[in-house]
Amino acid sequence: MTRTALAGLTLVAIVAAGAGGYWVGQHGVVLPGSSIPPPASMNAAGQTLTVASGPIIYYRDPDGRPAYSLDPRKTDDGRDFLPVRASEDVSFEDRPPVPALSAADATPKKILYYRNPMGLPDTSLVPKKDSMGMDYIPVHEGEDEDGSIVKIALGKLQRTGVRSETASERAILRRVRVPGTVQPDERSVSVVAVPADSFVGIVEKVTTGDKVRKGQPLLELRSADIATAAVQLLITPGYEGSHRRLANLGVPEEVIAEIERTRKVPPAFRWPAPRDGVVLERNATEGMRMSAGEVLFRIADLSTVWVLADVPEYDLASIAPGQSATVRIRSLPGRTFEGRVALIYPQVAKETRTTKVRIEIPNPDGVLRPDMYADVEIAAGSGSLVVAVPDSAVIDTGTRQVVILDKGDGRFEPRDVTTGLQGDGYTEIRTGIASGDRVVVSANFLIDAESNLKAALRGMAKVEETP
């Protein structure tokens, strides 16, 4: 076949396609797979009707020619261009089939008001255009009956990423992380002090940091007051007052028993360790003079230590005795120590607005030393089951908390709630919803904005209707 013949066949095909398109446009035929619905029409029997809806997007040539205009326009022979509404515009998205309306159902409904086509909070009781020439959208009777329900097309939900989850009962544990320090157990600290003015005699080879046993000798004291009381015990044997005076001076019971047995007053009195533990402080030096009340040794049992955590004032409401705590020592990387909250101190430090929280930690190997720095993590919360939703489901406006209920089929309802504890990515809901309700956890701000706009439009419509 010659090139001239091929060119002729191509020209014939183009002319045929153009003529066919012209005929289709004139007769309103919808081709299979086309997303352009026919204009509003009724068949001869008056049984079905397809109604165009939405604002006017543009105007098209009445003969189906590829001529369009954003403003009203006429053809060369004086005919008006046909308006194309939003439902008639070309769309590349899959649309569900539009059911045909019966003639009875096609009866126009009462128009309540007209709203701004761009979603602005502006309404009108009469048809009007916005600043760009777009027609206001009519809101018909029955479309705005429930002001609390927001309806969104399913396709739009998928595009905006709206996702819902079910509210459920769970125990909320909030991890409170605060700094702390290691301290000895105050109940396991003993002090060896001078009961009366004395001179220090022999001091045993015990230094700070050494471990001692209960009853182990520490030093000898020479005191005139103690010697005088010992002489009175020998002069009046069996007299309870003499025995009690020596005990009040701090003389150990075993020393008093030795005096009664030997009937002799020793030149120096030996002082033993009052408990098992570690020497935290030593102030005794052989030959020095000590006044009554001065501390010679401070001994502590470190088999159990305290961690004093500084908890901020705003976290105190979630802390309670008995809660578990995990302690990490900065100088012992990789090691953790478990304990429980034993006491919340009754005073808040006015400089730091923190309160001491005591955590008791077993220390059998003695690696925890007083004044070590610690990082404390307290598992705050009651542990009881409460209705909870993901944190992202709660919209906090500053004055109220809102969640969006998913009612199904693209219907959503904003609901005011009262929140409680937060932890592990969940928020306790005390009032407003129940376990089993579905709430929006993603893109809920868009639905909330739509709800606020709808409420504003309803309020403005009511104001305009007021004479």
Image: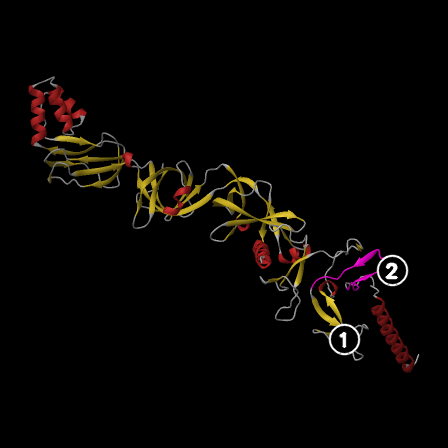
Residue 147 % position (x, y): 61, 51
Q: Residue at x 84, y 72 (%)?
A: 22
Camera-side residue: 185 or 396?
Answer: 396
Q: Secondary structure at mark 2?
A: loop
First in sequence: mark 1 vs mark 2: 2
Residue 69 % position (x, y): 72, 74
Camera-side residue: 6 or 419?
Answer: 419
Taking the image as shown, residue 312 lies to the left or right of residue 56, namely left
State whether residue 263 is above or below residue 48. above
Q: Secondary structure at mark 1?
A: loop
Badge 1 crowding class, 10 Å Cα cut-off, few under 14, some 14 to 19, many 20 or more, is: few
The residues bearing labels 1 and 2 have C-alpha atoms spaced at a distance of 30 Å
Camera-side residue: 137 or 298?
Answer: 137
Taking the image as shown, residue 314 lies to the left or right of residue 259, namely right
Q: Quarter-wise, where is residue 70 in the image? A: bottom right
Quarter of the image for the C terminus: give it. bottom right
Camera-side residue: 391 or 105?
Answer: 105
Q: Which residues are magenta?
A: 36-54
> Which residue has dot 1 on it?
67
Assign the magenta stretch its main secondary structure: loop
> Which residue has dot 2 on it?
44
Taking the image as shown, residue 183 lies to the left or right of residue 172, namely left
- As drawn, the residue found furthest toward the right would be 1
